[in-house]
Amino acid sequence: MKKKILSVLSVICLLLTASCGKPEQKIIYRDTLIIENTQSTFEGARERFYAVLNSLKTRVNLLEESHNTAIEQENPDSYFLDSNYILRAFDPFNIPSLEITEKIDDAVDEQNAADIFENEAEGSSVIFARTGSGYTLKFMSETLTRIYDASYDAKTDSLRFVYSQETPLQDKDIEFLEFAKAEENSYAIQSNKARCYITFDEDGNIISFKCAELNEGEYSADESIFAASDTDLLTFKSDVDGGAKSDYDNIREYNEGVLTHIETVEGNINEVQIYSDIYASVFVYN
């Protein structure tokens, strides 16, 4: 009977872990930028935006989570009272309306759009039109028109996405996103609430970045970096670098291996520095 029990336990171990007694493997995260989609299309630029954003978010969130874990271990009962404890996760450029573009490829046209977007239209009429290297998708009813405008400029490898609504009383831009390739290995990103400029080395490792999220008001879609010149993008970088700390709800700045998190709460500015060398073991590099 004892041998039978041991045999059953051995089978369970094999099923659950494939090998009993081995230590749990540590998960290693990669924040290196890897560009897989190089197509000169809106879809290709959108995938490059996602790649840059994921690299950025991995770097920030892993450093801040590791920093927070160290504080939790030192003060398990009162860590949340520590002024250096970071409460807000880093999730800029979260544009829910952008997801609809993932259903649009070369096969979508004026004739089949109504069938493809039947659920999203919610009974509204569907109008789809190609516009150069982009397109416009509209859901129209008597009381509301929802408009998704997607544009791509191959010369500057930049994209622009605007979601807006029209009613009989007013027109309103709800969300916008712009992403542009800047100087060598650098990218500029902006939305209603955030701006970021990030630079990588030739191997895709992050050299520096600054991301600033507004605490009040919004950036205007008229302040565009779509199809912008190199000079305009450098001006954009200077604007991001030069903004007053009090203008922003959250700032993340990374330079020379140090992540600086600046947060404004009720007019009080709190600044935390995290040294990436301390937590280097959670990353893997090229």
Image (cartoon, rainbow, N blue to C red):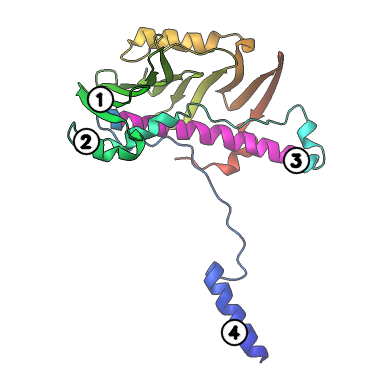
* Residue segment shown in magenta: 44-72
Quick one: 277 or 216, which is closer to the camera?
Answer: 216
Q: In this figure, which residue is indicated by the disc labeled 3?
A: 72
The residue singled out by tag 4 in the image is 7
Disc on the earlier residue, 1 or 2: 2
Question: At label 2, which amino acid type do we have?
Answer: Val
Q: Position of residue 239 (x, y in %)?
A: 49, 9
Q: Quadrant of the N terminus?
A: bottom right
Front-most of 178 and 229? 178
The dot on residue 63 is none
Residue neighbourhood size for the residue with mark 3, other residues' Cα within 10 Å, grouped as few (<14), some (14–19), many (≥20)? some
Q: CA distance from mark 1 to mark 3?
A: 49 Å
Dot placed on the residue nearer the N-terminal end, 2 or 4: 4
Q: Report the disc number at residue 108.
A: 2
Mainly helix, strand or loop, the magenta region?
A: helix
In front: label 2 or label 4: 2
- The residue lying at 71 percent from left, 13 percent from top is 267
Mark 2 or 3, which is nearer the eye? 2
Of badges 4 and 1, nearer the viewer stands 1
What residue appears at the point 33 percent right and 34 percent down from the top-left corner? 123
Classify mark 1: residues with Cα within 10 Å, few (<14), some (14-19) or many (20+). Answer: some
Residue drawn at (79%, 31%) of the image = 81
Q: Secondary structure at mark 2?
A: loop
Residue highlighted by disc 1? 135
Sequence-first disc among 4 and 3 = 4
- Estimate the spatial distance between the alpha carbons at disc 2 and disc 4, rounded to whole Å: 57 Å
Q: On the image, which quarter does residue 107 sit in?
A: top left
Q: Is residue 138 magenta?
A: no
With 57 as the anchor, is 4 left or right in this view? right
Residue 203 in sight from this viewpoint? no
